[in-house]
Image (spheres, rainbow, N blue to C red):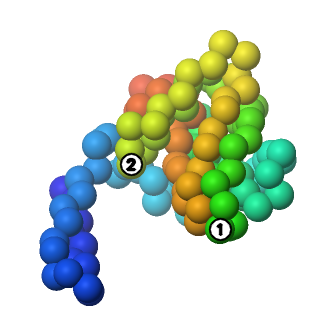
Amino acid sequence: MGWQLRSRVTGIVTERSYPHAASRTLPHLLGWGDYTVLRVDAPEVLAIRYDFRGVSMLTLHNFSSRRQSFAVDPRTDNSGLMVDVFDENHSRSESGMHEVTLPPYGHRWYRVGAPDDALNRASF
């Protein structure tokens, strides 16, 4: 599964596939879960952690025209690993504090703890 994007200027088609099966559960985390806005050192960056049935996801969005570097702590029991949902920019940290750099107007979505926490989910 994936999507295609055709450039309006060049007409070139870019294909993109989702590298992790975990991306199938994103709508559940974003739509049904609780959320917490996290503070980061860059005021141009919005950091939101979503929690649903024992699974956490962190979304980071840079609203500035400059690259932003900052530290973020997802503040969960499994904060040592953040798995990038759409790319390979994974992050490991013993302390739970992760250094992240976002490009201008860029974003990253991370699974916190593991690529797929299906076995760790809490029941309703």
* Left-right relation of 107 to 39: left
56 or 45: nearer the viewer:
45
Answer yes or no: is residue 111 visible: yes
Hey, what amino acid is under mark 1?
Ser
Q: Residues within 10 Å of mark 1 (few under 14, many from 20)?
A: few
In percent of width and height, residue 49 lies at: 67, 47
In percent of width and height, residue 98 lies at: 67, 30
* Quarter assignment of residue 69: top right
The residue shown at (59%, 50%) is 102
In percent of width and height, residue 101 lies at: 61, 43
Q: How many marks?
A: 2
Q: Quadrant of the N terminus?
A: bottom left
* Left-right relation of 9 to 32: left
Contact flag, marks 2 and 1 (Cβ < 8 Å): no
Q: Which residue is mark 2?
A: 86
From the image, state whether disc 2 or disc 1 is nearer to you.
Answer: 1
Lower sequence index among marks 2 and 1: 1
The residue shown at (65%, 68%) is 65
* Quarter assignment of residue 54: top right
In percent of width and height, residue 118 lies at: 42, 33
Q: Which residue is mark 1?
A: 65
Answer yes or no: is residue 30 visible: no
* Left-right relation of 41 to 122: right
Is disc 2 placed on a helix, strand or loop? loop
106 or 75: nearer the viewer:
106
Hey, what amino acid is under mark 2?
Phe
Measure the C-alpha gap from mark 2 to mark 1.
22 Å
